[in-house]
């Protein structure tokens, strides 16, 4: 009982510390939409780097990744640590830098607003916002699932899944309503630095208890020798490449990540951030995924509904340290969730409510409506999370694939002035229809010349169908643009910016 009280005290204490930082940020935040959403575009290198980093420290990364490494081996490092670390940095330059230049010139707050203005289309603006909110819903839900599972694993089931999910939901609603982007970014920086520190301390602690890296490797060789060889029936080249590409391209269109392309205080801030990004990713992902891998060799038994990392730490580190790591992980999940809710509310209020319901909405009233949207969205995802629709990796991959369908049409529009309204609409709608059909229609087999051919499968020959959707989106955007002419109210000059 004393140990449980200590664990809960550390978890709640850490969350309250984060809330305190949010209160400080609230005191210096103006009650206008641009400051609430983008901190008046004044973020520096360290804060931009770590707020992007902490925003991606979701349950998918911190718990889903080690769980997959525990079950299938460490090649997940190739997907998330190496390939996505590099791929996303490249996309940050290609898309993020161009968006920053456009945002500085035109004052945009959201991707939907930027596209709607360029193509003179409220319909396009609402479509992009609606698609983004649709795929954001399961990813916010994933954070609540991760929190519930983390506290269940840490406390040995003393705290039920629903209570852990409810705790993180309540805190993230309160925090986002109070803090806005400035508080989110400040807290993200502290949480990112904290998580890097405690994860490496956790690695040292576990290794010291099992005889160092050689001891952990020997145990893995004895129990799971296949984990020491590159590749497997699960980690095929098709799986590794397609998953890495879909995740990297999907992350680029996540509202909470894409909106950070607008917040840098200068172009130097942005460039330094995407150069340092791969290093920061490897510093976190390598130790966390290795901990999951070593746990398999150490004979760690993970209860159903729990995650491997809390169970491993409870076995090899003191209760207070395990609780501290999980508190940091929960806070990292809150960093992801609060950013998602903040960006989601901006998409809803600015790109759906304002143009379709109240075009005369004032800046101050918009900021307060955004806070109400945060509470409603978080409550809805919490209720949905109670059904636990799949594993963390399954839920996360589905959302990544949905967002990835937006990336290539947006990239074409950013760099090709010949893109037309009809072209980008066709690219976005066509790719989403293809992907949605494979997500929601059950797989069926059709007999062709005595061979069963799958239809509506998520993968074909090991390749994610999301890749086909991405290719279709690019082809439709270019092809339809070549066959159509720009409407009178389209303005391609909005995407013409000065050289860096």
Image (tube, rainbow, N blue to C red):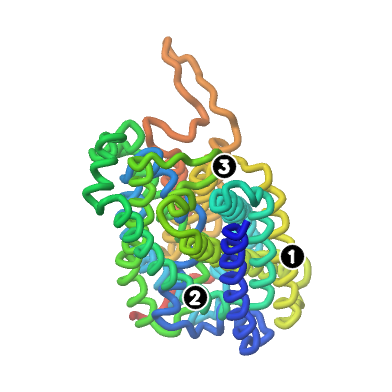
Vertical placement of 425 versus 98: above or below?
Answer: above
- Label 3, on which residue? 305
Tell me the quarter of the image containing the N terminus.
bottom right
Select label 1 or label 3 by which is in front.
3
Density class for disc 1 (Cα within 10 Å; few <14, some 14-19, many ≥20) is few
| In-image side of 95 versus 186 (left or right) | left
Residue 19 drawn at (x, y percent) = 62, 75
Residue furthest top as drawn:
450
Name which residue lies at 42% across and 69% down. 96
| In-image side of 183 versus 477 (left or right) | right
Select label 2 or label 3 by which is in front.
3
Select label 2 or label 1 by which is in front.
2
Q: Nearer the viewer, residue 120 or 376?
A: 376
Q: Nearer the viewer, residue 278 or 271?
A: 278
Q: CA distance from mark 2 to mark 3?
A: 38 Å
Disc 1 on helix, strand or loop? Answer: helix
- Label 2, on which residue? 262
Location of residue 20 by image quarter: bottom right
Q: CA distance from mark 1 to mark 3?
A: 42 Å
Vertical placement of 466 versus 449: above or below?
Answer: below
Regarding residue 265, the answer to whether it shows in the image is yes
- Label 1, on which residue? 356
Disc 2 on helix, strand or loop? Answer: helix
| In-image side of 232 versus 130 (left or right) | left
Location of residue 108 by image quarter: bottom right
Vertical placement of 457 versus 297: above or below?
Answer: above
Residue 262 drawn at (x, y percent) = 49, 75
Density class for disc 3 (Cα within 10 Å; few <14, some 14-19, many ≥20) is some
């Amino acid at each position: 009982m004393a140990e449980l009280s200590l664990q809960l005290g550390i978890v709640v204490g850490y969350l309250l510390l984060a809330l305190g930082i949010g209160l400080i940020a609230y005191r210096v935040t103006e009650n206008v939409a641009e400051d609430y959403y983008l901190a008046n575009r004044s973020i520096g290198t360290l804060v931009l780097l770590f707020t992007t980093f902490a925003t991606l420290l979701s349950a998918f990364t911190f718990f889903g990744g080690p769980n997959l490494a525990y079950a299938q081996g460490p090649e997940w490092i190739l997907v998330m640590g190496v390939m996505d670390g590099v791929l996303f940095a490249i996309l940050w330059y290609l898309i993020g830098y161009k968006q920053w230049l456009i945002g500085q010139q035109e004052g945009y707050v959201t991707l939907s607003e930027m596209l709607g203005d360029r193509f003179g289309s409220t319909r396009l603006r609402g479509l992009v916002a609606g698609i983004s909110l649709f795929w954001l819903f399961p990813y916010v839900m994933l954070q609540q699932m991760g929190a519930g599972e983390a506290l269940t694993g840490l406390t040995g089931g003393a705290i039920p899944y629903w209570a852990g999910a409810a705790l993180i939901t309540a805190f993230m609603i309160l925090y986002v309503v109070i803090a806005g982007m400035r508080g989110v970014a400040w807290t993200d920086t502290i949480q990112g630095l904290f998580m890097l520190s405690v994860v490496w301390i956790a690695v040292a602690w576990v290794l010291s208890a099992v005889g160092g890296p050689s001891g952990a490797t020997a145990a893995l060789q004895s129990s799971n020798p296949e984990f020491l060889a590159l590749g497997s029936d699960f980690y095929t080249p098709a799986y590794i490449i397609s998953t890495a590409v879909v995740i990297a391209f999907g992350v680029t269109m996540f509202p909470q990540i894409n909106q950070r392309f607008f917040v840098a205080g200068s172009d130097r801030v942005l460039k330094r951030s995407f150069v340092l990004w791969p290093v920061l990713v490897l510093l976190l992902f390598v130790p966390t995924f290795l901990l999951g891998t070593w746990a398999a060799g150490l004979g760690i038994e993970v209860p159903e509904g729990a995650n491997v990392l809390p169970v491993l730490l409870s076995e090899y580190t003191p209760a207070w340290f395990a609780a501290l790591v999980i508190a940091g992980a929960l806070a990292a999940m809150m960093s992801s969730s609060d950013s998602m809710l903040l960006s989601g509310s901006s998409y809803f209020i600015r790109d759906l409510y304002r143009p379709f319901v109240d075009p005369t909405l004032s800046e101050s009233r918009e900021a307060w409506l955004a806070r109400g949207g945060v509470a409603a969205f978080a409550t809805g995802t919490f209720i949905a999370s109670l059904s636990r629709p799949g594993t963390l990796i399954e839920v996360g991959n589905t959302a990544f694939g949905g967002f990835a369908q937006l990336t290539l049409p947006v990239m074409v529009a950013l760099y090709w002035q010949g893109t037309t309204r009809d072209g980008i609409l066709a690219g976005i709608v066509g790719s989403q229809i293809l992907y949605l059909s494979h997500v929601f229609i059950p797989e069926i087999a059709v007999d062709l010349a005595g061979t069963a051919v799958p239809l509506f499968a998520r993968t074909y020959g090991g390749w994610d169908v999301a890749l086909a959707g991405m290719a279709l989106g690019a082809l439709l955007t270019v092809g339809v643009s070549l066959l159509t002419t720009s409407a009178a109210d389209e303005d391609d000059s909005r995407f013409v910016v000065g050289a860096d």
